[in-house]
Image (cartoon, rainbow, N blue to C red):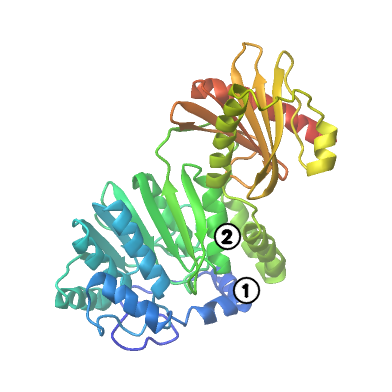
Amino acid sequence: MTSRNFTAMRTLREEEKVYEATWYDRMYRLAFGAIGWPWLLRSLWGGTQASKRRLLERLNLPEDALPNLGSWKADTRFLHRIVDAIEELRPQNVVELGAGASSLVCAKALQLNGGGALFSFDQHAPFVSATSQWLSDFGVSAEIRHAPLGARIGDWPGAWYELPDIPGSIDLLIIDGPPWAVHPFVRGAAECLFDRLADGGVVLLDDAARPGERIIAHRWKKRWPQIAFTHLAGGTKGTLQGRKRTGKILAFPATAKTGGQWRRVAVIAGLLATGWIAHEVVGDLWAPAHAASFIDEGEASYSASLARLAMRSQIESAMLDRAEIRRSVGLEVPSIPPGWRVIDVQVYPSDSGNSVSLLLLTERQERVVLYAQRAETPAEANPLSEDREGRSLAYWEIGPFAYALTGELNPERILLLASEMASTSLGESLHS
C-alpha cells in the first residue's frame, strides 16, 4: 500500500471490520517480531534513488510519479521484477493482493506491453478509492477492489481477503498483502489461487526474506510440485518467484499432511517458538537446490549419457561400485533392480556438488538414466513425475539425496520404475 507521503511504521487500521486475533496468533506475532526485527527494519528502506529513476524511465512516468518507497511499500527491486514479468509474459490477467505503488507500476507496464487487465485487492476501502484516482491521474486504469479481511483459508492462520470476482485464469499473481501483523504466515493462504494459474503463469511474493515468508515458501514447495519456486537474489526484502510448469505432473498417492500440527505447535509456541522457527527457517535458508534446477540437471544427464554412448572417443564404464562412490563423492546410489544392466557410470559436477549418472537397461531392455545428487525437491519417498518433450522424468528423495529416473517411456511406466527403486532405497536406508 502507498500514498504520496511517507507511510507510518505501522500498517493502516481496518475501518469496516476488525480482525479479532486469537491468543496464539498474537503469540506468533510476538515470537516472529522478536526474531524477525532485522528483516522488518530492512523493509523500511525502499531502494536507491538511481533504481527508482531507472524504473520511472522504463515506464515513461514523471519523476514525481512514485511516492517515498520506504516503510511498508514495495521496494524498487520488487517493482522492477513486476515490470520484467509483464514484459516477458504479456499477461492477459494480473491479480494483485495489496494495492499501492505496485498497482501504478503494474498498470503502466501492462499499458506499454500489449494491454491486459489488472485486478487489485486491498482491505482498506478509502485507500482503494484513493488509489483508483491516483492511477487515473497518470492515464492508467485497473480494477481496484475492496476485499476486507474475513475467515481463515484452509490450514493457514490469520484472516484472509474476501475476494470478489477473481478471474478464472491468472497469468501473473503478485502477493504483497495482507501485512505480517495479521499473522506471519497469513500470505500462505494465497495458494487458494494457485489452481487458477495458467500454464507458464508466474507468482511473485514480496518480503520473501522474512522468516514467516520463508516458512510459507518451504511449504508451498512441498504442496505445489507443479510450480517451480525460486528465491531471487537482490532487493532489500527478497522475492520468491514461482512459475507453473507446462508439463503434466503425476504423483502416487501419499498420506495427506493436515494442518492440525500448526494448532498444536501454536499452543506451546510461547516456550518452543524460537527453536521451532529456527528449524523451519534454517532448513529453508540452506536448502541446497530447488526442484527446477535439479530436474533440469537430471534431464540434461540423460542427453549427456546418450551423447557419450554415441561417441567413439568416450569409453563407457560399466563398473558400479556403490561403496566407492559413497566414500569418494558422498552420494548414496540406490541398488539396481534384478535383471537391470549397467551400461555407463559417470561422476558429474553440479551446482550442489558432485553428482552421479548411471545409464541403465531395464529387464525389458528399456534405456533409462538414474541421476543422483544432494538436493531438496517437493518429492519425498513417493516419486513425482514430469514430462519433458517426449521424455518422462520421475524424481524422489531419500534423506539428503535426490534421485531422478529419465527415459523415453510413458509417464506411468517411468513412475512405476522409480517407485520400485525408491521403495528399495528407502528400505536400505531404514536398515542401515
Q: Quadrant of the N terminus?
A: bottom left
Among the 4 quarters of the image, the one containing residue 302? top right
Name the side, left or right, on which 86 lies relative to 314. left
SS category of the residue bearing label 1: helix
- The amino acid at mark 2 is Ile
Is residue 234 or residue 379 the one in the foreground? 234
Is tag 2's residue or tag 1's residue first in the polypeptide sequence?
1
Query: For residue 203, what is the image quadrant?
Result: bottom left
Is 99 placed left or right of 403 in the picture?
Answer: left
- Pointer 1: what residue? 31
Above or below, comparing residue 353 to residue 208 in the picture: above
- Given this view, does label 2 or label 1 mark the residue nearer the observer? 2
The image shows residue 169 at horizontal and vertical percentages of 28, 46
Does residue 1 appear in this view? no
Write down the residue under mark 2: 215
* Element on which disc 2 rests: helix
Say whether residue 12 is left or right of residue 209. left
- Residue 293: percent from the left, percent from the top? 55, 46
Q: Residue at x 28, y 85 (%)?
A: 4
Residue 161, given in percent of the width and then of the height, sits at: 36, 62
